Image: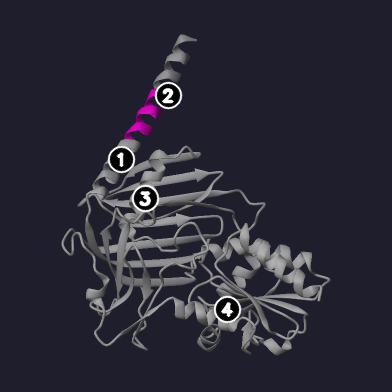
Amino acid sequence: MNKIFLTFIISFLQLSLWGQSDTIYIRKVYDNLKQIQSASYFWYQSASSLYDTIPSRSYSVFKKEFDNQEDKFVGASIASFQLSDTTKMIYFYDGNVQSYLDWENKIIPVDSFQNNRYPFRTVYPPFLTHVKSLLKYALETSDNKIIHVKDLADSVLISLSFYDTLVEVVGNWIVYADPPNLMEDKWSKYEIWISKVNNLPYRITKKFPDRITWETCKEIRINKTDKINFIASKYFPTDFVIKSNESNSNKEKNLIGTVAPSWELKDTNNNSIGLGDVKSKVIIIQFTGIGCGPCYQSIPYLIKIKNQYKDQELEIISIETWNNNLSVIKKHVLSYHISYKYLVCNNEVKLKYGIQSVPKFFVLDKNRVIKKIITGFDKEKTYVELKDTIDQLVNK
C-alpha cells in the first residue's frame, strides 16, 4: 500500500514539475516578446474549414509592427506592404485610425471607428503582438486549459488548449464566441512554434470548431526600424487623396431607401440565379466569406431566422466574397447544414453594394428597396435587429 502511494506521489510530482516547467518556458518567451519595440517580416496566412486541407483563403504581405502601449485595443501599430514591392503600403493602423490604401484610385479612405459595432476594434493584431497577447491570456486566465511544451529538433512547440471555451485574443481584448452549430462543444486550440535560434515565434496554427488558420513569418528582424514613433503618413504617396470614413458611411446611408442593385450569380451547382428570380416578400442578403469568424457565428442564427419565418415569404441569400472554388464552397454549405441560398460573388456586385468587409447584411422589402443595412455580426444585437426589421416588413 505504501509502495503504491509512493509511486502515486512520485508520478504526481513529475506531472506537477513538468507543468511548472512548461509555464516557466512560456513566461520566458512572453518576457522576450515584451522587449520588442519594432519588427518587420514576411507574413503568410491561410484559412480553411476545420479538417479541410484546401485553403479557402490565402494572404501574404510584408509587415512592420510597432509596440504601442497607449493603444488599449491592439497594443501595437501596424503597417502592411505589397509582397512584390515592400515600399508600397497597402494597410495601416496607428492606434487611432486604420485604412486599406486604394492604389488603383489613389485614395486613402481613413476609418476612425466612429461606426464600430463592437466594444473592441476590428483590427487583426500583428503576428508577434498577437502571440504575446495569447501567451499572456494563457498564463493568467482561469478558463479550463491544458498547456504543453514539446522540444523539437530546431524549435519548441507550445500547445494551448481551452475547453468549454471558444476564445480568440483580438489584441488586448479576449473575445468569447459560439460555434456555428450551437449544439457543438466549445473549444479552442493553438499551436505556436518557437525558433531555438532567436527564441521568437515564427508560426502559429489556430483551430476552432468551425475553422483552422495558419500563419508563418519569415526573415524576422527585431528593433531595426522606426523603433518607437510610427507615423503612417511618411509612407503615403504624395499624389494620394485622404478621405475620411464619413464618405463610406454616407454611401451606406444612401443605399438605404434605394432599390437594391440587380445581379446574376452562380450557386454551388453552377446554376445562375438573379435577384429578379427571387419572389419572396422579404429578402436578407448576407455578404460573407469562408474563413471569416463572425460569418461562421452568423450561420445558426440565419438558419434560425429562416425556420421562424418559413411560412411568411422570407428568403435568405448568402453571397460568398472570399472564395470562388465551387468544391470548397459546396463542402462548406454541406458541413454547416446551410439551408438557404449560397451564391458566389464577383467584383461588380461587391462594388455595387460597397462591400469592403464581411459579414454585411441587407434587408429588402417586397419592392426590393433596401430597408436595413447591418455591418458585422454580434449574436446579441444582430439577430434582434434582423428580426425586428423582418417583423415590420412581413406585417405590412
Q: Which mark lies nearer to you, 3 or 2?
A: 3
Q: Residue at x 51, y 80 (%)?
A: 250
Q: Which residue is mark 2?
A: 12
Element on which disc 4 rests: helix
At which x and y percent is residue 10? 39, 20
Report whether residue 328 is seen.
yes
Q: Residue at x 70, y 85 (%)?
A: 368
At which x and y percent is residue 32? 24, 47
Distance, label 1 to label 3, CA atoms, is 12 Å
Amino acid type of the residue that numbered disc 4 sits on in the rendered structure: Leu
Amino acid type of the residue that numbered disc 1 sits on in the rendered structure: Arg
Left or right: 272 as drawn, with respect to 18: right
Q: Residue at x 71, y 89 (%)?
A: 276
Q: Nearer the viewer, residue 350 or 182?
A: 350
Q: Which mark lies nearer to you, 1 or 4?
A: 1
Check the image and report above or below for 225 versus 330.
above
Q: Earlier in the sequence, mark 1 or mark 4?
A: 1
Amino acid type of the residue that numbered disc 3 sits on in the rendered structure: Ser
Element on which disc 2 rests: helix
Q: Is residue 300 magenta?
A: no
Q: Which residue is mark 1?
A: 27
Q: Nearer the viewer, residue 102 or 146?
A: 102
Distance, label 2 to label 1, CA atoms, is 22 Å
Prevailing secondary structure class for the magenta stretch in the rendered image: helix
Specify the farthest residue to the right: 311
What is the number of the mark on residue 133?
3
Amino acid type of the residue that numbered disc 2 sits on in the rendered structure: Phe
Q: Which residue is mark 4?
A: 326
* Marks 2,1: beta carbons within 8 A: no
At which x and y percent is residue 192? 36, 51
Q: Earlier in the sequence, mark 2 or mark 4?
A: 2
